[in-house]
């Protein structure tokens, strides 16, 4: 798809940005300033789709399913079986919006016995 843009910022006859064209296959360039915001919004929608009401750990009478910061996500479960279920569910919902887990960066951690 050829996309072109012209005169993004202008003041009457003064053109600040000239016409340019580029080839974009899909998505937003990673270094684009909008990229983290789009990723965050997309990820928020992913978490709203997940059905984890019965999975997680109880913290102060609330069920905690995950912690996240930017693109780092930690799924929280009391044992490995629900963790596997969460990961499969998370991967499926991410796939629905075009996100893919990086399995080389995926880790399981265990706390306690």
Image (spheres, grey):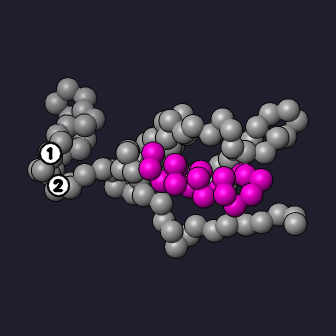
Residue 77 left/right relative to 23? right
Give the vertical position of 30 relative to 5 (above or below).
below
Q: Measure the C-alpha gap from mark 1 to mark 2.
A: 7 Å
Q: Which residue is mark 2?
A: 22
In contact (CB < 8 Å): disc 1 and disc 2: yes
Magenta region, residue range = 76-93
Give x and y (percent) for residue 105: 56, 69
| Element assignment for label 1 | strand
Residue 109 left/right relative to 19? right
Which residue lies most toward the front here? Answer: 81
**Closer to the camera in the image, 59 or 22:** 59
Residue 58 left/right relative to 24? right
Give the vertical position of 45 relative to 22 (above or below).
above
Give x and y (percent) for residue 20: 15, 50
Say which quarter of the image contains residue 9: top left
Residue 79 highlighted magenta (yes or no): yes
In which quadrant of the rendered image does the C terminus lie?
A: bottom right
For image coordinates 54% across by 39% down, the residue present is: 50
Which residue lies most toward the left here? Answer: 2
For image coordinates 77% across by 66% down, the residue present is: 110
Give x and y (percent) for residue 24: 20, 54
Q: Which residue is mark 1?
A: 4
Residue 98 highlighted magenta (yes or no): no
Q: Is residue 52 visible?
A: yes
């Amino acid at each position: 798809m050829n996309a072109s843009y012209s005169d993004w910022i202008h003041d009457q006859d003064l053109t600040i940005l000239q016409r340019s064209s580029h080839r974009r296959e899909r998505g937003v360039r990673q270094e684009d300033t909008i990229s983290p915001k789009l990723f965050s919004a997309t990820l928020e929608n992913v978490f709203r789709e997940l059905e984890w009401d019965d999975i997680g750990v109880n913290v102060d009478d609330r069920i905690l399913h995950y912690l996240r910061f930017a693109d780092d996500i930690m799924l929280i479960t009391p044992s490995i079986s629900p963790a596997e279920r969460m990961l499969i569910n998370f991967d499926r919902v991410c796939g629905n919006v075009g996100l893919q887990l990086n399995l080389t960066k995926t880790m399981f951690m265990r706390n306690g016995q």
